[in-house]
């Protein structure tokens, strides 16, 4: 594949895939490849949707060996697709957030002396002190989270310091649990990486520092103080005597998201013909990388429809709250990223789709879902006097709000009054016949699940938006959809109906590859910025062309419809509060 000038590689190690994407200095995509964990390794590692699950304990985790194997495979695939890796000047990437990789004492030496005779798996598996990385869907750390919130007096105070209240999946509570449950693993561990610094470490041939944005997904980094929170770390370490050891395991946090951390390991030079001058930039989390996939402005919103569903905005104001997450911006000091993350995103929509009669179009597995979404009017209000429908479709215990699994179906009047539980409790998610019957049919569920997911995002982001111009009510200027689900026109329509978007709803042309693309753009900026002063927005903003990069897929704001969802938003909030109360939270 001919291309003049340097190339940059971006990786994305997400829940279900490892993707690689190559761009040139003009930001054109030159090549891409992917490894699909289920399709490529499902049998070997016994994973499903990229992970292993221990239902009893609420543990969700991924075999690190599988990721090591995937790195070799994705490079083989992208080389076979014709990419000349010797042209790659620099690389960076994005990885699922919050997971941790546990290295033993041999790791540093092993990473720096890899032989091309063997695979990464053969050489690095023995450098792990724990074979698994906790996954962001894990919910085994309620006890640890309670201790975090208590230590800081309240979830609000913990959020003020670390950007978030305690969350099951956050790395701090996860490390604390592993120390308690597996003391031997903990003591044999010399370094702990986030998934992003793990992938960077493999390419660097040395354990890489954590990234300034991704570290905010751990409940242990003091965002305003720009340092580790000693209070939180002392808890994780089990007391002050454990603190020095834990600090050593965590290593440094790199505050500059750009520049190079060092040359790529000779393993990749010899095996895949990378140039020996190719450098490794800091890697970051998949959500922080997503906001780098385009020049995002403060009133724009991104909805990432991957395995998780996330809602992302950037802001110069640090306004933490236990209901959402604040993270440092991955490239721009003084900017922050606002994030909501839902476990019941893509997989929950798939569950609803899969009980509908199968799609009659082999090329579109979502046709059976999209038709009822588009044929059902907003909130299923067909005529005046009909009640508005809403629900929670939680196949897994949810993050926001912290509600256990189940499906609740509620209605209210169109003006939001008279909220009513239509089933008298949740229908079970395991398909058992016990418990209440669903209050409406599955065709209606298809619309209501997407609307309710969007309503939750609108409710929680309302304080971050203002009118984009005097003729619009407060809402995002643009809504960008990324991730696998961004290919879906019916979901785009509902996002526009509920969230608005004064300039419309857009899809990134790279669709599911947005975070890998953000990683590749980060590499371009990391190595081409003029000294340290040229910002990511200046460099990428000047080179990015809207045509060919994004596509308008929905009008966004529709007067009347947008307002009708505004009427029921507080009923939606009341529904959540009522269920939380019933669960004793
Ligand atoms: N046309 C579609 N409509 C809705 N969802 C889709 C569509 N195509 C793919 N998806 C969803 O996208 C998800 C995978 O998205 P992706 O961003 O690749 O995931 P991840 O990065 O988390 O591994 C799958 O769970 C799948 O259900
Ligand atoms: O937990 C979060 C964010 O807080 C998730 O968004 C993970 O980062 C996984 O992302 P995907 O694999 O769904 O892209």
Image (spheres, rainbow, N blue to C red):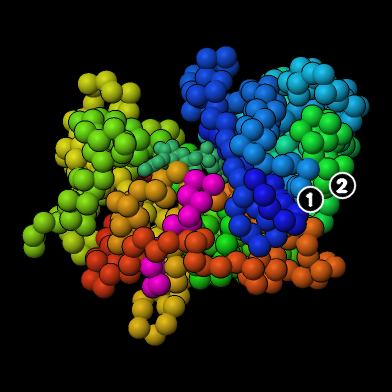
Q: Which residue is mark 1?
A: 89
Circles 1 and 2 in contact, beta carbons < 8 Å? yes
Tell me the residue at 67%/49% (across/down).
2
User: 202 or 457: nearer the eye?
Assistant: 202
Disc 2 C-beta below 8 A from ligand 1: no
Which mark, residue 181?
none
Tell me the residue at 72%/42% (across/down).
84
Residue 65, position in %: x, y?
A: 68, 22
Q: Is residue 480 left or right of residue 314?
A: left
Residue 270, position in %: x, y?
A: 84, 31
| Badge 2 element | loop
Tell me the residue at 69%/47% (across/down).
9
Q: Residues within 10 Å of mark 2 (few under 14, many from 20)?
A: some
The quadrant of the image that shows the C terminus is: top left
**Quarter of the figure with residue 334:** bottom right
Residue 216, position in %: x, y?
A: 68, 50
Compared with residue 173, is residue 211 higher up or lower down, i.e. above or below?
below
Q: Residues within 10 Å of mark 1 (few under 14, many from 20)?
A: many
Q: Is residue 328 left or right of residue 475?
A: right
Range of magenta residues:
498-513
CA gap between label 1 and label 2 equals: 7 Å
The first of marks 1 and 2 along the sequence is 1
The quadrant of the image that shows the N terminus is: top right
| Badge 1 element | strand
Residue 134, position in %: x, y?
A: 62, 29
Q: Is residue 241 left or right of residue 296?
A: right
User: 123 or 218: nearer the eye?
Assistant: 123
Q: Which residue is mark 2?
A: 277
Q: Residue furthest bottom?
A: 470
Compared with residue 193, is residue 113 higher up or lower down, i.e. above or below?
above
């Amino acid at each position: 594949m001919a291309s003049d000038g340097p190339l940059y590689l971006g990786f994305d190690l997400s829940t279900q895939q490892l993707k690689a994407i190559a761009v040139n200095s003009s930001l054109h995509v030159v090549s891409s490849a992917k490894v699909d964990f289920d399709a490529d390794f499902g049998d070997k590692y016994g994973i499903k949707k990229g992970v292993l699950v221990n239902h009893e304990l609420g543990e969700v985790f991924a075999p690190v060996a599988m990721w090591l194997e995937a790195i070799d495979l994705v490079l083989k695939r992208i080389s076979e697709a014709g990419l000349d890796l010797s042209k790659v000047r620099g690389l960076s990437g994005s990885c699922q957030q919050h997971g941790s990789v546990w290295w033993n004492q041999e790791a540093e030496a092993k990473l720096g002396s890899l032989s091309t005779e063997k695979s990464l798996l053969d050489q690095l598996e023995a450098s792990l002190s724990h074979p698994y990385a906790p996954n962001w869907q894990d919910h085994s750390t309620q006890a640890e989270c309670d201790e975090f919130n208590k230590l800081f007096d309240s979830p609000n105070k913990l959020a003020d310091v670390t950007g978030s209240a305690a969350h099951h999946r956050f790395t701090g509570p996860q490390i604390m649990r592993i120390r308690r449950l597996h003391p031997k693993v903990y003591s044999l561990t010399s370094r702990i990486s986030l998934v992003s610094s793990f992938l960077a470490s493999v390419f660097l041939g040395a354990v890489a520092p954590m990234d300034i944005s991704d570290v905010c997904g751990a409940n242990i980094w003091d965002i305003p103080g720009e340092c580790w929170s000693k209070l939180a770390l002392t808890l994780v370490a089990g007391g002050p005597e454990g603190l020095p050891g834990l600090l050593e395991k965590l290593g440094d946090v790199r505050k500059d998201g750009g520049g190079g951390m060092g040359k790529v390991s000779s393993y990749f030079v010899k095996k895949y013909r990378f140039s020996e001058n190719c450098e490794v930039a800091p890697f970051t989390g998949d959500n922080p990388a997503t906001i780098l996939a385009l020049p995002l402005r403060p009133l724009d919103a991104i909805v990432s429809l991957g395995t998780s569903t996330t809602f992302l905005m950037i802001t110069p104001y640090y306004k933490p709250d236990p209901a959402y997450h604040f993270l440092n911006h991955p490239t721009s000091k003084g900017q922050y990223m606002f994030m909501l993350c839902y476990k019941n995103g893509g997989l929950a929509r798939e569950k609803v789709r899969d009980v509908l009669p199968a799609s009659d179009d082999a090329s579109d597995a979502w046709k059976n879902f999209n038709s009822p979404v588009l044929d059902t009017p907003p909130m299923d209000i067909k005529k005046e006097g009909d009640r508005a429908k809403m629900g929670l479709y939680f196949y897994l215990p949810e993050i926001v709000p912290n509600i256990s699994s189940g499906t609740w179906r509620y209605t209210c009047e169109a003006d939001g009054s008279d909220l009513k539980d239509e089933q008298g409790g949740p229908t079970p998610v395991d398909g058992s016949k016990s418990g209440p019957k669903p209050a409406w049919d599955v065709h209606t569920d298809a619309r209501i699940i997407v609307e309710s997911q969007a309503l939750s995002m609108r409710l929680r982001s309302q304080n971050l938006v203002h009118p984009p111009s005097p003729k619009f009510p407060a809402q995002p200027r643009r809504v960008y959809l990324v991730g696998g689900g961004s290919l879906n026109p019916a979901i785009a329509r509902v996002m526009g109906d509920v969230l608005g978007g004064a300039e419309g709803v857009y899809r990134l042309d790279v669709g599911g590859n947005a975070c890998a693309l953000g990683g590749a753009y980060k590499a371009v900026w990391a190595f081409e910025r003029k000294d340290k002063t040229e910002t990511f927005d200046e460099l990428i903003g000047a080179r990015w062309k809207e045509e060919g990069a994004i596509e308008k897929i929905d009008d966004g704001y529709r007067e009347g419809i947008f307002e009708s969802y505004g009427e029921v938003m507080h009923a939606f909030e009341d529904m959540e509060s009522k269920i939380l109360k019933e669960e004793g939270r």
